[in-house]
Amino acid sequence: AIKIKANLLLCNMQQQGKKYLQLIGNNIRKKRNELCISQQELADNADVAKSTIQRIEKGVMNPSILTLINISLALEIDLSKLISAKKK
């Protein structure tokens, strides 16, 4: 019974993590589109590969804090707003 509860808890945490990664990706895409810049332009300005931006925006990559900082600087947005679940 304990093992089942632990597995359920882990599964729930993984689902929440995926949702949060999707939220961050959506925030990045929204800000990038507001600035009318391409994924390649953002990648160049953030010093990451275009595929990294694509994967982050899709919510399938868990970026490092340094990558998120570089992206936030390139988008000229506070990191806290980039990773926030609150409406902007």
Image (tube, rainbow, N blue to C red):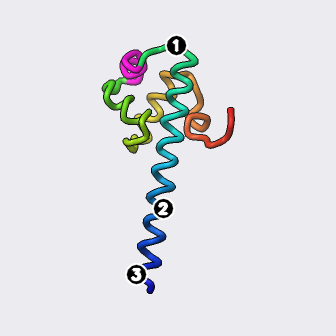
Among numbered discs 3 and 2, the one appearing first in the sequence: 3
Q: Which residues are magenta?
A: 39-46
In the displayed image of the protein, which residue is found farthest to the right?
A: 87
* Residue at x-position 42% and y-position 79%: 4
Q: Nearer the viewer, residue 84 or 87?
A: 87
Quarter holding the N terminus? bottom left
Rendered residue at 44%/64% (across/down): 11
Cβ–Cβ under 8 Å for marks 3 and 2: no
Which amino acid type is marked by label 1? Cys
Q: Is residue 88 left or right of residue 14?
A: right
Q: CA distance from mark 2 to mark 1?
A: 34 Å
- What is the number of the mark on residue 21? none
Q: Position of residue 88 (x, y in %)?
A: 68, 32
Q: Main secondary structure of the magenta part?
A: helix
What is the count of numbered marks? 3
Q: Which residue is mark 1?
A: 36
Residue under label 3, please give it. 3
**Residue with the mark numbered 2:** 13
Left or right of residue 16: residue 66:
left
Q: Residue lying farthest top?
A: 36
Q: Quadrant of residue 60?
A: top left
Vertical position of residue 64 compared to residue 28: above or below:
below
